[in-house]
Amino acid sequence: MRINSPPIKPKLIRPCRAQNVTLSVYYETLCPYCADFVANHLVKLFEKRFFSIVNLRLVPWGNAVLQTDGIFVSQLENQYAAETARLNPQHKFVPWVLVNDQPLQEDFKNFVTYVCNAYKGKQVPQACHSLPLMNNSSKKATSGYPVCYANSRKN
């Protein structure tokens, strides 16, 4: 017996919009602080519909170190390693968060405010209107957040 069902149409993924803000997160999969950031903070993109103005990039390399023989398990790992090595300035810890290629450094948990301030499009999410505005001279939050430091076995 053959069942005729309508063909499944693939869900089209919206292309990146030029006016959207690029949010890049460099992380290490075994760092508990990265897991906390993704599960408890990055989720704000979806809870308050910020995802409509963000091109999210997750780069799972972070503090990983290349072996002296330079062998990788996959080309994807090679790509992430090269991208992480080209960061300027170099990352000091993970999670290392950038908004439009500008590192937030110790203020990474305030990424939503940076995203809203960087967005130049016309349809600003309602949640952006309730956030404090920042400028370059504003004082950044002090780092009280635990992170996994680069080039360190103790975290």
Image (tube, grey):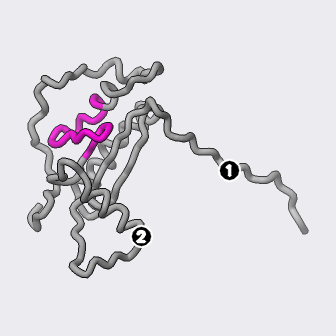
Residue 86 location, quadrant:
bottom left
Q: Residue at x 42, y 36 (%)?
A: 54
Magenta span includes 111: yes
Callouts 2 and 1 close, C-beta under 8 Å: no
Q: Give x and y (percent) for residue 23.
A: 35, 41
Residue 28 shown in magenta:
no
Q: Which one is nearer the viewer's eye here, 150 or 142?
A: 150
Residue kind at label 1, given as amino acid type: Pro
Question: Could you say where residue 37 lies in the image, as x and y percent from the top left?
Answer: 27, 47
Residue kind at label 2, given as amino acid type: Gln
Crowding at dot 1, Cα within 10 Å, few <14 / some 14-19 / many 20+, comes out as few
Which quadrant is the N terminus positioned in? bottom right
- Considering the image in quadrants, where does the C terminus appear? bottom left
| Residue closest to the eye, 6 or 107 | 107
At x 31%, y 48%, the residue is 25
Where residue 5 appears, as percent x and y from the top left, is 83, 55
According to the picture, the residue beneath numbered tag 1 turns out to be 10
Please state if 34 lies on the left or on the right of 119 as rendered: left
How many marks the image carries: the answer is 2
Please give the label number shown on residue 75: 2
- Vertical order, 34 against 19 (above or below): below
Q: Residue placed at 30% from the left, 38% from the top?
A: 99
Q: Residue at position x 32%, y 79% from top? A: 71
The residue mark sitting in front, 2 or 1, is 2
Say if 87 sits above or below 79 in the image.
above
Residue segment shown in magenta: 97-114
Q: Residue furthest right?
A: 1
* On screen, residue 33 above or below 47: below
Observer-nearest of 155 and 121: 121
